[in-house]
Image: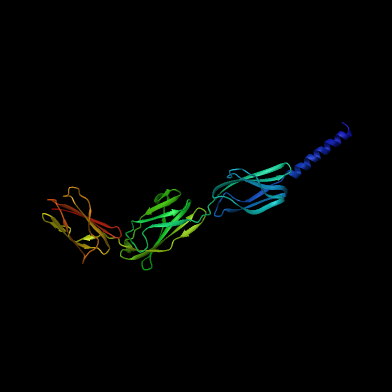
Amino acid sequence: MGKKVIFILVFAILLIDLIYALENFTINVNSPEDNIYNSRKVFIDISSDTTLDSISFISQNDKILTQRNLCKHCKKYYGSKTFDEGHQLISLFATKHLTTIDYNVSFFIDSAKPKIAIISPRQKSFSNGYNFSLQLIEKNPKSLSINYGNYVKGFVYRNIDITNECENIDNSFLCEFNLFLDDYDSDSIFYDYELVDIAGNKVKTKPIQVEVDTKKPLLLNPDSFYSYSDSYIDFILDIDENNLKSIKYLDYGDEEPIYKQLCISLSKSVCKKRVPTRASTHDVSITIIDRAGNIKEALLKK
């Protein structure tokens, strides 16, 4: 083998080593991470140990996949890019000469602040603890809590189990649950909610005041609350209840028995009313409801 051939071979080997050395590089991706972000603007932090021809990326969620440059003839890129809500998958590319290193990362974006729509009980209404409901305007709730009570008897903090006490309906959640309010009977309480989503966004409602009534209405004359003649029923109900909503009756002696309104208020704790009837026999049922939803039922046969 001639000296010229040997020289060419040595030169070729050195050239290959040089090209390899020029193209052999590493990259470090510090951001984004496999994480949940509460902003659509996400920082991209990528660097190399050498100057690159370009750093670029592709968002795999785009309808048309387009490789977008972040920088050219650079060793690093540090800046923010805007992405859509929800799950994201991006591919980062670092290119030098004939070599490209790619790096895939997925993350989730939830930048929308959660909202709460109070359903019941409303401000200045009544509650017995069995009528708490609300709607979460949030796709990705993480935790929900209620704080209730007053400054005399103290406050109670309770976590609401979103999985078991809330129902997912059209990307929102309807929550219904009960509270034990016997300790606050006949008092006012305040309650408020705090909702946190998976990205750490949170909302807290303003305190709502409600009146507590956990006791059922008391009928003091269950064995004599009505009498009847041929064409009338005379009702005289002696009732212990400060927050009456309505009293209804049903006469099973009617041809088509249905509940009818009897009283919506009391006069000196008494509901007194005469109603016409065509029935010859009477089995009368009454339902007394207070403003907190407590119900007392009684049946008297004559």
The colour scheme of the drawn protein is rainbow
- Residue at the (42%, 54%) spot, across then down: 135
Q: Which residue appears farthest toward the right when viewing the image?
A: 3
The image shows residue 241 at horizontal and vertical percentages of: 25, 63
Q: Nearer the viewer, residue 236 or 26?
A: 236
Q: Nearer the viewer, residue 207 or 262?
A: 262
The image shows residue 85 at horizontal and vertical percentages of: 54, 50
**Is 227 located above or below residue 61 in the figure?**
below
Residue 296: quarter of image: bottom left
| Image quarter in which the N terminus is found | top right
How many numbered badges does the structure rendering display?
A: 0
Q: Nearer the viewer, residue 211 or 2?
A: 211
Q: Is residue 37 left or right of residue 18?
A: left
The image shows residue 71 at horizontal and vertical percentages of: 69, 50
Q: Which residue appears farthest toward the bottom when viewing the image?
A: 152
Q: Is residue 62 left or right of residue 245?
A: right
Residue 89: quarter of image: top right
**Is 85 located above or below residue 270 in the figure?**
above
Q: Which residue appears farthest toward the top when viewing the image?
A: 1
- Residue at the (78%, 41%) spot, across then down: 17
Q: Is residue 150 left or right of residue 236?
A: right
Residue 127: quarter of image: bottom left
The image shows residue 124 at horizontal and vertical percentages of: 35, 64
Q: Nearer the viewer, residue 278 or 263?
A: 278
